[in-house]
Amino acid sequence: MTLETFVRLAGVGQLGILIASALVPFRLEWKTAMAALPALHRQMYWTYGAYTAATILAFGLIAVGLPGELAAGTPLARSVCGFLALFWGARLCLLGVFDVKEHLVAWWLTAGYWLLNAVFFGLLLIYGAAAVM
């Protein structure tokens, strides 16, 4: 498999992450949990979530639609891939910060959680490779 193929798969992985992300507000009962917050805090939380989802969507679509460009090794491609490697590496670092245990109440939730983290790691590796090649 070529780097271009791996980049395309990374894009598909990012789009898949959005499916899981869409379930988070329901699974964590955001409407109830954030009801006590002031309106501005709730609005900011949703805005940050939307910006993050839009970023993942945009880079996922770019990777699916233009994998050759991202794998080309140009300074711009390497910079974008370096950013994406840092983005997903930072998300992996949050494994040590987020306390998710109380929410992993079924085997499929635990499996999904670890599958997502495996995808994050794969994205770090793919984009990291594309950034340095």
Image (cartoon, rainbow, N blue to C red):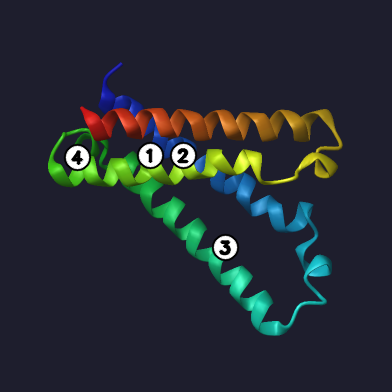
Looking at marks 2 and 4 on the same chain, the residue that comes earlier in the sequence is marked by: 4
Image quarter of the C terminus: top left
Residue 115 pos. (x, y %): 62, 29
Indicate the quadrant containing the N terminus: top left, top right, bottom left or bottom right: top left
Q: Residue at x 59, y 33 (%)?
A: 117
Q: Earlier in the sequence, mark 3 or mark 2?
A: 3
Q: Position of residue 56 (x, y in %)?
A: 45, 51
Mark 1 secondary-structure assignment: helix
Q: Given the current orientation, which residue lies at the most extreme top position? A: 1
The amino acid marked with disc number 3 is Gly
The crowd level at tag 1 (other Cα within 10 Å; few <14, some 14-19, many 20+) is many
The residue at which mark 4 appears reads as 69
The residue that label 3 is drawn on is 49
Tell me: 15 left or right of 65.
Answer: right
Q: Is residue 124 left or right of residue 35?
A: left
Residue found at the far left of this picture: 74
According to the image, label 2 marks what residue? 89
Residue 74: percent from left, percent from top: 13, 39
| Residue 85 circle label | 1
* Mark 4 Cα-neighbour bin, 10 Å: few <14, some 14–19, many ≥20: some
Amino acid type, residue under disc 4 in the picture? Glu
Compared with residue 116, is residue 31 higher up or lower down, i.e. above or below?
below
